[in-house]
Amino acid sequence: MASGEIENSDYQQKRWHNIRKLLERSGPFCHPDFEPSAEILDYIMNSCKVLIVGAGGLGCELLKDLALMGFKKLHVVDMDTIELSNLNRQFLFRKNDIGLSKAKCAVEFVNKRIPGCEAIAHHCPIQDLDDGFYRQFHIVVCGLDSIVARRWLNGMLMSLLQYNDDRSLDQSSVIPLVDGGTEGFKGNARVILPGMSACIECTLDLYPPQKTFPLCTIANTPRLPEHCVEYVKVLQWCKENPWGPNTGLDGDDPQHVAWVHEKAQERAMKYGIANVTYQLTQGVLKNIIPAVASTNAAIAAACATEVFKLASSCCANMNNYMVLNMSDGVYSYTFSAEKRLECVACSNTTRVLEIEPDATLQVIYDKLCEDNGYLMKSPGITTVINGRNKTLYMASIKSIEEKTKDNLKRRITELGLYNGVDLLVADVTTPNTITIKLKFSDSIDIDMSR
Amino acid sequence: MIKLFSLKQQKKDEEGSARAGGSQKKASAAQLRITKDLNELNLPKTCSTEFPDPDDLLNFKLIICPDEGFYRGGRFVFSFKVGPNYPHEPPKVKCETSVYHPNIDLEGNVCLNILREDWKPVLTVNSIVYGLQYLFLEPNPEDPLNKEAADELQSNRRLFEQHVQRAMRGGYVGTSYFERCLK
Ligand SMILES: [Zn+2]
């Protein structure tokens, strides 16, 4: 054995010394089912694939934390590029990086700085990556500031769930989602086991709505500098269309912000309101909440710890939603957010409807109304074909009924439906739109994961 | 507790190994929810909807023809745009018919609390329809968007009523011109 290798292995011993203590011996605080072994570290380092969604304030922290814990198979996705204002807290970026991809720069930095790390960057919107991409991961950890993106990701992970013949969940299809979020001095971290525990849609009410003011206050009785900016944004812009009727207000365009700032100041003057600054204007337009580096660090640490626990099974995970509030003293508590039975995302387990391939849509409609498993009253049926939504039949809306009633007479294959297609069916008898997969009766098998 | 480690010792499928037949795009949560909302839409007899494209459930029009109150006999069209963050965010609703109304301005902006500050994800398209219908039955001068109209409603109800009629027949109220919108 060459001396270099011995040194190397000695170095490796020392490098992971502390983590080995956690993974290679048992202890009174371990989970009762925990079986210590040297293989766990090997799994973390060489097998466990973790996707980090977002490479901003939380994402930089998450990437650094996980790489230092030994995770090597890390992927990072972020569509944004680096701006000057990011540099105070997004510590993997330097001034020279401004304008470059956040995901790429973060990954490059960490791979260089942490030996053995093999992180891979994806500079694109999360929606550009398909189910084949997401299915490869063992864990997804998410540090986003967008609720739309979170909901999309949540929906994606739900769609990857597979069920056994007895309709029980196949646990190997579960990809845990660890989600962190911060707003100023406040933050939260949570663990979601898709199909098993409360998901993003179950707790949509927990996300604070975007701050809005009554329109009449903005229009007639402004009192705050924010009211003046909102006035220009909501009412004055579409009245004056300073860049033509086809150009919407873009909070990232400095010229737009300057225009709004000027008009808002005029309005503030009229009502004797002070402090309409450029910064405030930009803040209201982009709905910016000041980011606090230490909040990001605390929340990311909680998330990274949960990822480590999930990967190793060494300790029980948080159950399941942690709140951290440092805006008035320091306060934290963890509660168990409950899975909602009528959740659109996680209670929507796909059911299968067997049908002759030459049947008409009417046959499906009748089955939904008459079959014992359904007994629906007036099902509205839609589907997605080649990425496009298609309304097959809906009786409740007169104008749609008129345009879709001929579909009932047509064969389902003529309508573009195929073996394994998902129908989305809404009816008063179910709390939500449900997904029903068509199975053509002459075909042997369909892939339930699609 | 889910034991990932023992459950998934083996490496997961490499990227791009999508199952045979490719991937099927899933409907978004917003899409699932609006389908439910619309299938259960229970319109008052004074209201109807129009879907220019029946496959696009996210963009449609609501037509209100009040049968009582100041606006009786008028026909008012509202456009609904349901965004990807529905129902976390409310739909964007604008009045496409020019109307002399305390809570609707000349650009078609509508001051209705559940369209902005009081929106909650449990509310539905139906809630908005009822809210809008109520605006025509009980215009609310306390929350003015058209201040002139609001002040007039409070100070001189008869004059307000005359102006509403004139606007609906098509004509000027003050310096603003209103298109005819009688049925
Ligand atoms: Zn759920």
Image (cartoon, grey):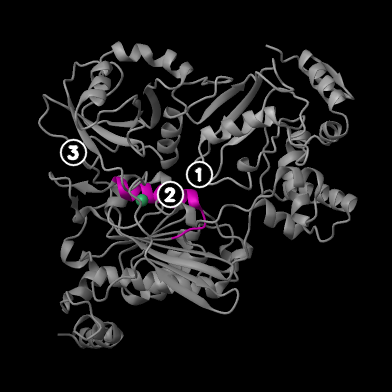
Which amino acid, mark 3? Asp
Select label 1 or label 3 by which is in front.
1
For the stretch drawn in magenta, the main secondary structure is helix
The verdict on label 1 being within 8 Å of ligand 1 is: no
Task: Name which residue lies at 47% across and 62% down.
Answer: A55
- Residue at the disc numbered 1: B85
Spatial distance from mark 2 to mark 1, Cα to Cα? 8 Å
Spatial distance from mark 1 to mark 3, Cα to Cα? 30 Å
Q: In this rendered view, identify the residue nearer to me: A318 or A3.
A: A318
Q: Is residue A129 at least partly visible in the picture?
A: yes
Position of residue A186 relative to residue A409, above or below, is below
Q: Which residues are magenta?
A: A143-159
> Is A246 on the left-hand or right-hand side of A274?
left
In which image quadrant can residue A246 be found?
Answer: top right
- In the rendered structure, which disc, 2 or 3, sits on the residue that comes first in sequence? 2
Select label 2 or label 3 by which is in front.
2
- Residue at the disc numbered 3: A447
